[in-house]
Image: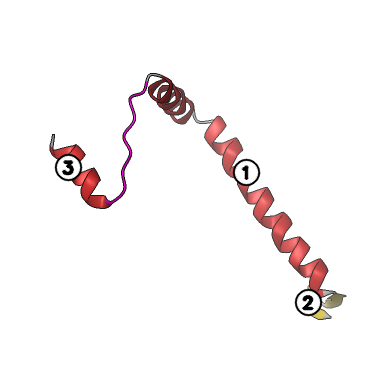
């Protein structure tokens, strides 16, 4: 069991509970990040344009940073 101090009180939780709480924290952080992106009009517009580029085939397969350098030098 892990012992965690909360304010002036002690709380003892199992390792499994602690692990589940960390997993939940990570999930909530992901949800908050998604909400922030969806509330940013420029980000949403950029995502929309990117989706259109993929549908139209305007994408490149990059296997290394050198491939990216070659693409940018064109």
Query: Which of the marked residues, 3 or 2, is nearer the chain's N terminus?
Result: 2
Query: Which of the marked residues, 3 or 1, is nearer the chain's N terminus?
Result: 1
Residue linked to disc 2: 4
Residue drawn 75% across the image and 67% down it:
19
* Span highlighted in magenta in the image: 57-64
For label 1, the crowd category at 10 Å Cα-Cα, with few meaning under 14, some 14 to 19 and many 20 or more, is: few
In the displayed structure image, the side of residue 35 where residue 72 appears, left or right: left
Percent position of residue 7, x then y: 79, 73
Residue linked to disc 1: 32
Residue drawn 81% across the image and 69% down it:
16
Which label lies toward us, 3 or 1?
A: 3
Q: Secondary structure at mark 3?
A: helix
Residue drawn 68% across the image and 49% down it:
28
Percent position of residue 31, x then y: 65, 43
From the image, give the main secondary structure of the stretch colored magenta.
loop
Give residue 12's mark: none
């Amino acid at each position: 069991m892990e012992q965690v101090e909360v304010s002036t009180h002690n709380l003892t939780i199992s390792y499994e509970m602690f692990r589940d709480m960390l997993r939940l924290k990570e999930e909530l952080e992901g949800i908050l990040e998604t909400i922030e992106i969806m509330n940013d009009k420029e980000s949403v517009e950029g995502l929309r344009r990117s989706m259109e580029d993929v549908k139209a085939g305007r994408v490149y397969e990059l296997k290394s940073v050198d491939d990216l350098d070659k693409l940018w030098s064109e």
